[in-house]
Amino acid sequence: MIDAMAETYHVLPSKLLEEGNTLDIQIFNHVQTHKARQQKLKAGEDITETYRPEELEALWQERTQR
């Protein structure tokens, strides 16, 4: 992941390790996931593999029962 981040942001990996933090990693990961999802949408591929319906239902039940 460090290599991909360094290439994307045009910095040396050592600089990224020195100055980067977990927020940088979270943002990068989110952006990469979003880009992959958008590419799948454009290609007409299935994007529902991220969560199974049962997982979504369990999350919904957990949040609404509070």
Image (tube, rainbow, N blue to C red):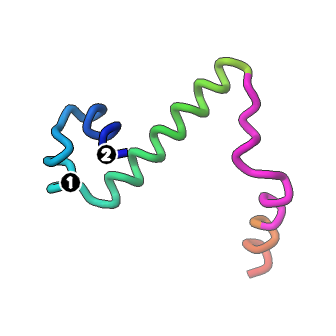
38 left or right of 8 in image: right
Element under disc 1: helix
Q: Residue 63: x, y in percent?
A: 73, 72
Which amino acid type is shown beneath numbered disc 2?
Answer: Ile
20 left or right of 64 in image: left
Circle 1 residue: 17
Which amino acid type is shown beneath numbered disc 1?
Answer: Leu
Circle on res. 2: 2
Q: Residue 33: x, y in percent?
A: 53, 40
15 left or right of 25 in image: left
Q: Callout 1 environment at 10 Å: few (<14), some (14 to 19), or many (20+)?
A: few
Majority secondary structure of magenta residues: helix
The region drawn magenta spans 45-58
Q: Residue 3: x, y in percent?
A: 30, 39
Based on the picture, tell me whether residue 23 belongs to the magenta stretch: no
53 left or right of 25 in image: right
